[in-house]
Amino acid sequence: MDQNTVFESGIAADKAEGVSFLRMDNGFAVYSVGSGRYSFASKYAAPEPIGKPGEEDKHTYVVDEFGDYNSMFTDSTGLRFDTANTDKYFFGDGTRICRTSLSEKEIVYYLSDDIKSINLVTFTGKNSDWKNDFAFSVSSDNSTYVPLEIQDATREGNTSWVRITYQFDQIPEGMRFFKIQFKPMTGNAWEPQLAKLTVDCGVENPQFLTVDKHVLQKAFDEASLIDLSIYTEETANQLKAALEQADKVLQNTSATQQMIDDAVEALQQAVDGLIEKPQNVDKSILNAVITYAENAKASGEYDNAIESVQKSFDAALENAKTVAANAGATQAEVDVVWRTLLNEIHKLGFVAGDKPSLTSLIKIANGINAKLDLYVEAGKPEFTAALEAAVAVYEDGDAMQAEINIVADNLLNAMLNLRYKADKSILEEVLAEASKVDANAYTAESYAALQAAVVEASNVYSNENATQEEVDAAVTNVQTAMDNLVVVDGTSAETPTEDVVQTGQESTTAKANAEKTGDFVPIAGVVTMVVVAGVVMSISRKRK
């Protein structure tokens, strides 16, 4: 410090009225002053920190002196820099920014880390309502902003300009964007002015970022989780290439916003372009039904049907052909269209004594009968009986049309009533995992909820006629109950295991004790009973 760095009301102290510089004393400037009120300030540059040569200066804050636009993420047009009257009014601050008009303007800063506190130095007119000069807000995504109330501010100087310093220490968590808005007003466009911004992030060497990579990072993270094994090699490789390029852009500290946006678009296009590998789908029944439908249409039955039936028949036949030609069609899609088409064929009716039609129907039924193990038990006896009856009528040379119609109707309805068995492999795994849960490790309420879910799921597992929807719901209920288990100290256990060490109100007890008191029925026992019941049921069937 020396006499050249000391100011009184924004003017160099040795030139201020009533002030005389006397001497420097042990690093302090000494002045004599006349009677009156004075406001002294010093623009003092701290010495460089002492350290090893080349050692990086580590700090938790980042500063913008408003000498250029390089630190800003975005800024409005209509801003300018002001360097006039530095010593006279602005305490020696020679880099400031203001507006070119009195309309609303804004500046947005994007920080590399979460914002902990903000210090902003501004200048405004002596008689201005400085609390209404600016509006301040923060955001985590540059979309939704949270207003910042003025928490602390100091006012210095008594000339035409005063220095206002805002301090914000109560910043919500996760905020990385800081917005400064010049409010619209009347008066002079050069008032107010921004002089210095300091943002503390609480971590070493934070930075102002001029590009936004958080959208790309999110797209990259989501695309990285996709299981590429179920997609064709070509489309999977396209996504791999897009991921590699996106990673390079994320690691590139010199990447432009255009490069980032292009990487996001390329990732999205690669994800949208993924094509699943063809599944091992059985279309034999579908193709047989299509052939049957085409024969029915060519035989004259179609011409005798009413117009509405012809339209629905044509739509079902066309849809069936489309699915048959689709290499990516699923088994569920195949099954739906052949059942729909078969029902439309039934609507056409049967011509008197038309055994060829019955022959086609029996052929389709024989295809189903060869894979009858894929269907649930309910409906099988009726199907087998209907097929046997249809074959008997077909082999009867004296069969009348009425008999043919009856057995054909019964066989068709029996075929439509068959349902595929539900896939219970995942339910079996979930029940096995639930059986490992130690009742003593969790609160009675949360473990009771798991017990109830396991009992219900076990019943579904034992039910041979359970639908896939019921199986899927049982899996979800057990998984939810396991996720909601609460250990005895009151904390949630997202992945319960047998090795949980309990503390708190309920101390660890042996499983035997829990069973004796009747508080819990171990889930392992419930699952075991389900398995045993399945074995007994199987043996009973074999004896029959």
Image: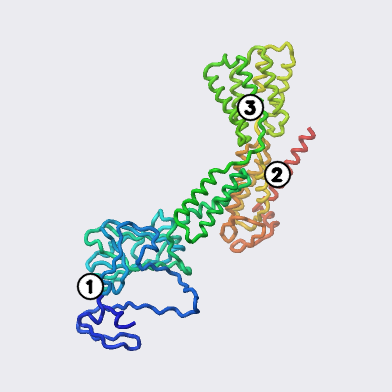
> In the rendered structure, are the residues bearing label 3 and label 1 in contact, judged by CB atoms less than 8 Å apart?
no
Q: Amino acid at mark 2?
A: Val
Front residue of this view, candidates 324 and 487: 324
Q: Position of residue 146 (x, y in %)?
A: 38, 57
Would you place residue 199 above or below residue 340 in this image? below
Name the disc covering residue 416, or none: 3
Label 1 or label 2, whichever lies nearer to me, is 1
Tell me which label, 3 or 1, sits earlier in the chain.
1
Tell me the residue that label 2 is attached to.
530
Q: Position of residue 461 (x, y in %)?
A: 67, 41
Q: CA distance from mark 3 to mark 2?
A: 31 Å
Q: Amino acid at mark 3?
A: Leu
Residue at disc 1, secondary structure: loop
Q: Position of residue 395 (x, y in %)?
A: 74, 16
Q: Amino acid at mark 1?
A: Thr
Would residue 415 be visible to someone looking at this image? yes
Question: Mark 1: few, some, or many residues within 10 Å (few <14, many ≥20)?
Answer: some
